[in-house]
Amino acid sequence: MRKFGLIGYPLSHSFSKKFFTEKFKEERITNCEYELYPIEKVEQFVQLWSDNPELCGINVTIPYKVQILPFLDEMDEASTEIGAVNCILIGRKLGEQCIKGYNTDAYGFEESLKPLLEAHHRKALVFGDGGAAKAIKYVLNKLNIPFLVVTRKPSENSILYDAINEELLKEHAILINTTPLGTSPNTDSCPDIPYHLLSDKHIGYDLVYNPEETLFLKQVKAKGGKTKNGLEMLHLQAIRSWEIWNS
């Protein structure tokens, strides 16, 4: 039996388990299972793969995307530059067990964003600068899209929400929410920006996917802008994980 799974804490809800369980069933993939491994401390990862020799691949979610790094033997280019891992391949190299980290969040975001881009989408505003923003900033740099990070607290590397004005929004037509604002059940919250200044030239991309349409996306759509939530990104990163585990 080939085992795969997800580590994080807590793991009350998992997109990944549902996705892979359905994938195995629909594609008649036998001898594979995907389980949740809610470990309270990242150090428990060592015992986890020691106790499960059939473990071939692991997805990583909060709070361990950065904490897991010291336990890896190798990292791919994207995860090295981003400084976070959400996919692990457990394999063998020269007869020895090798644990390699990848960042498939970056792939998922890039492939889901590109179809939305038009010639006037030259610059971006990224709301929030937590762990979720790491892969987003990596992709924007890769696509040569200059961006400004917007935070609630002053920082050398960001601007404050009250600095967002009409001129800034005309120049930055890509708006990306990496914060948890608007996530169910707190669906009445959203990034504090002047939505009345938006137009049909804007893209609103929200990493939140529950609810399907956040208040942020509703307000961008009301002004004629394109919108997308984080669900396709999740699907794409999961598909990429499966490709890595079977490479």
Image (tube, rainbow, N blue to C red):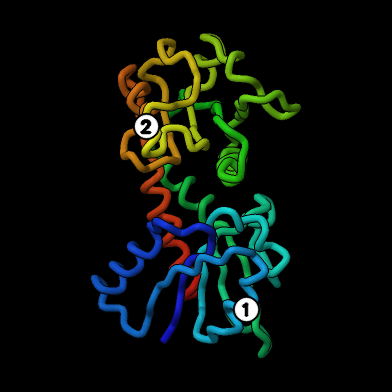
Hey, which residue is sitting farthest right in the picture? 156
Q: Amino acid at mark 1?
A: Gln
Q: Which residue is mark 2?
A: 187
Q: Which residue is mark 1?
A: 47
Q: Amino acid at mark 2?
A: Thr
Q: Quadrant of residue 240?
A: bottom left
Give whichever of discs 1 and 2 has the lower sequence position: 1
Q: Give the side of residue 31 with respect to residue 95, left or right.
A: left
Crowd class of label 1 (few under 14; some 14 to 19; many from 20; radius 10 Å): few
**Measuring 50% from the left and 20% from the top, which residue is drawn there?**
192
Q: Secondary structure at mark 2?
A: loop
Q: Nearer the viewer, residue 48 or 233?
A: 48
Q: Position of residue 208 (x, y in %)?
A: 42, 40
Q: Position of residue 5 (x, y in %)?
A: 46, 70
**Measuring 58% from the left and 62% from the top, which residue is drawn there?**
102
Q: Position of residue 24 (x, y in %)?
A: 31, 73
Q: Secondary structure at mark 1?
A: helix
Q: Is residue 178 above or below residue 34?
A: above
Q: Is residue 17 above or below residue 206?
A: below
Which numbered tag is attached to residue 106? none
Quarter of the image with the N terminus in it: bottom left
**Measuring 41% from the left and 29% from the top, which residue is drawn there?**
204
